[in-house]
Amino acid sequence: MSAGLAIAPPRALFISFEGIDGAGKSTHLDAAEAWLRARGAEVVRTREPGGTPLAEALRALLLHEPMDALTESLLVFAARRDHLRRCIEPALARGAVVLCDRFTDATFAYQGGGRGFDLGVLARLEAWVQQGRQPDRTFWFDLPPAVAAARRAAARAPDRFESEDEAFFERVRAGYAARAAAEPRRFVRLDAAQEAESVRAQLLDALQALVAEAGGTERGR
Ligand code: TYD
């Protein structure tokens, strides 16, 4: 092994990416994935709803079939249960770094904030389905809904959530803010209204801090 490989690769971290539609998370997921791979990590990139065949089938229903907020919440948590058991937990157990495009904070933001669904019921489902499992860190790409809407307008045909109005996304944003305030150590808020290059720099700094905290850059020294 060369001296450059003395630093142990990041291992067994569960990282989620959150924000309203149009925040630009997908681009930044690419940057995080490349950064981690360059440091030797095994990266599993996945998404919610989705990440397994069953959960992807539920995703298609969630994004396109009309349903009420309770049905939405139950389907999202059913998908999450399968995703945790068959993808996320095995990946963490073998030491992979899991990058998840949305996780339970999205349920609190969209079903809880956006739809106004009962947060107590969501908290019970969360405890029941996750058995204490939470991301080690959550990167929240935060920006005003009007800016996100302008970005979305340039993208493809909207799904059931993307076609909601600005007031809906204000409530979703407030839902994220409430989760971030409740768990300030887990959440990192990134100012996603800035230029992509600046958002990327904020993200990679925060990723570096997480990896250092988890011991990844210390071990080899
Ligand atoms: P998104 O992750 O933005 O994917 P894409 O980039 O392909 O549009 O889309 C998923 C949608 O699902 C998003 O609008 C938010 C919604 N959603 C919920 O309403 N609740 C949830 O718990 C999750 C995970 C997603």
Image: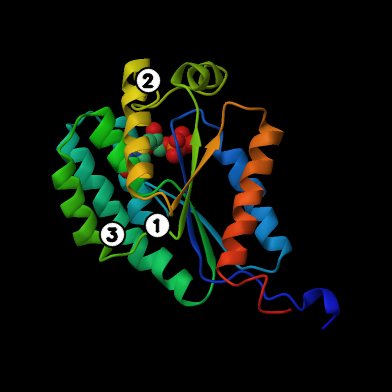
Q: Mark 3 vs mark 1: which is more N-terminal?
A: 1
Q: Mark 2 vs mark 3: which is more N-terminal?
A: 3
**How far is disc 2 from disc 3 in space, using C-alphas?**
27 Å
Q: Residues within 10 Å of mark 3 (few under 14, many from 20)?
A: some
Indicate the position of residue 56 as horizontal and vertical percent values: 38, 49
User: Dot 2 corresponds to which residue?
Assistant: 163
Indicate the position of residue 176 as horizontal and vertical percent values: 37, 37
Q: Residue at x 63, y 71 (%)?
A: 216
Q: Is mark 1 within 8 Å of ligand 1?
A: no
In this rendering, the answer to whether 80 lies above or below 139 is below
Q: Nearer the viewer, mark 3 or mark 1?
A: 3
The amino acid pointed to by label 3 is Arg
Q: Mark 2 vs mark 1: which is more N-terminal?
A: 1
Indicate the position of residue 190 as horizontal and vertical percent values: 55, 38
**How far is disc 3 from disc 1 in space, using C-alphas?**
10 Å
Q: Nearer the viewer, mark 2 or mark 1?
A: 2
Indicate the position of residue 158 as horizontal and vertical percent values: 43, 23
The amino acid pointed to by label 2 is Ser
User: Dot 1 corresponds to which residue?
Assistant: 52
User: Dot 3 corresponds to which residue?
Assistant: 81
Q: Residue at x 25, y 51 (%)?
A: 77
Residue 86 appearing in the image: yes
Instruction: State the SS at label 1.
Output: loop
